[in-house]
């Protein structure tokens, strides 16, 4: 493991640990807010990724362990003592979150801005859609099992698009007319997918489809 990989793993673990302290301890009286803050703020891992030098370290040492950890502290844990640790009330949502990050880190290690597209659409986009929709959503719709709102979906698009632009700027990618059009289409796709996906599975469908769509539409860039 290279020095930068060690630093990257250290920063990821420290950052997530700090988030857990805030969400599980400081905000434990507000479980819904706690869960949403954790969901959104984990997305900032995007800005740590360039430190890594090895695909396997990023995917299997920095990301994959959170698949096991989030499952063990969740309500579906086979170890009941551990399942009571988490106060944020998640089911498998955070497990899917970790799976998505692991897959994207491994598949797009050479194009980290593509990884950033998926993670930011999932964290900030989906997170703010849920927060805003729950508070201000007046026009509900239901495609499968989960109720969503037009207001929440609109905020997802309006949040995702500028975050994807920031992501490109962070990774020093050119903001051409073509790539801006790609980001608009990907933000719209992520919004539609979030609105259609039930049962917390959007933590898989949104990041994976957003990243793969961005990769496909931006081939040659």
Image: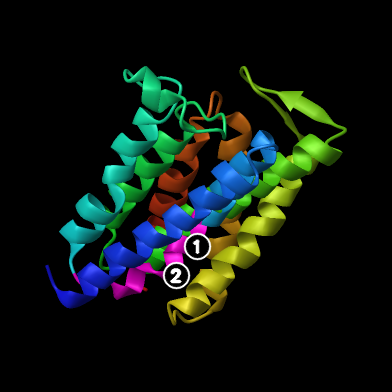
Does 100 sit above or below residue 17? Answer: above
**Residue 186 sits in which quadrant?**
bottom right
Q: Position of residue 132 (x, y in %)?
A: 77, 44
Q: How many labels does the image show?
A: 2
At a point 63% along the width and 39% down the height, the residue shown is: 28
Determine contact: label 2, label 1, CB under 8 Å.
Answer: yes
Q: Is residue 200 magenta?
A: no
Q: In which quarter of the image is the N terminus?
A: bottom left
Q: Is residue 49 magenta?
A: yes
Could you tell whether 87 is left or right of 75 in the image?
A: right
At a point 75% along the width and 47% down the height, the residue shown is: 154
Mark 2 neighbour class, 10 Å CA radius: few under 14, some 14 to 19, many 20 or more: some
Does 137 sit above or below residue 199? Answer: below
* Circle 1 residue: 44
At a point 56% along the width and 73% down the height, the residue shown is: 166
* Circle 2 residue: 47
Q: Residue 151 carries which label?
A: none
The magenta-colored residue range is 42-53
**Residue 153 sits in which quadrant?**
top right
Q: Is the magenta stretch mostly helix, strand or loop?
A: helix
Could you tell whether 30 is left or right of 214 in the image?
A: right
Q: Where is residue 73 in the image (x, y as percent from the top left)?
A: 40, 31
Could you tell whether 160 is left or right of 209 in the image?
A: right
């Amino acid at each position: 493991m290279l020095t930068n990989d060690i630093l990257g793993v250290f920063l990821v673990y420290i950052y997530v640990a700090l988030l857990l302290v805030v969400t599980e301890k400081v905000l434990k009286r507000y479980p819904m807010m706690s869960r949403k803050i954790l969901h959104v703020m984990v997305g900032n891992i995007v800005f740590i990724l360039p430190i890594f030098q090895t695909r396997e370290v990023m995917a299997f040492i920095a990301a994959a362990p959170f698949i096991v950890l989030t499952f063990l502290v969740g309500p579906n844990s086979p170890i009941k003592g551990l399942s009571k640790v988490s106060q944020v009330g998640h089911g498998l949502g955070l497990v899917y979150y970790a799976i998505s990050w692991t897959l994207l880190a491994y598949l797009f290690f050479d194009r980290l801005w593509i990884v950033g597209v998926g993670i930011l659409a999932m964290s900030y986009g989906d997170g703010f859609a849920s927060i805003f929709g729950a508070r201000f959503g007046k026009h509900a719709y239901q495609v499968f099992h989960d109720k969503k709102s037009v207001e929440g979906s609109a905020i997802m698009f309006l949040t995702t698009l500028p975050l994807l632009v920031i992501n490109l700027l962070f990774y020093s990618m050119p903001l051409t007319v073509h790539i801006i059009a790609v980001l608009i289409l990907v933000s719209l796709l992520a919004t539609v997918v979030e609105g259609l996906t039930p049962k917390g599975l959007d933590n898989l469908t949104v990041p994976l489809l957003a990243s793969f769509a961005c990769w496909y539409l931006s081939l040659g860039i």
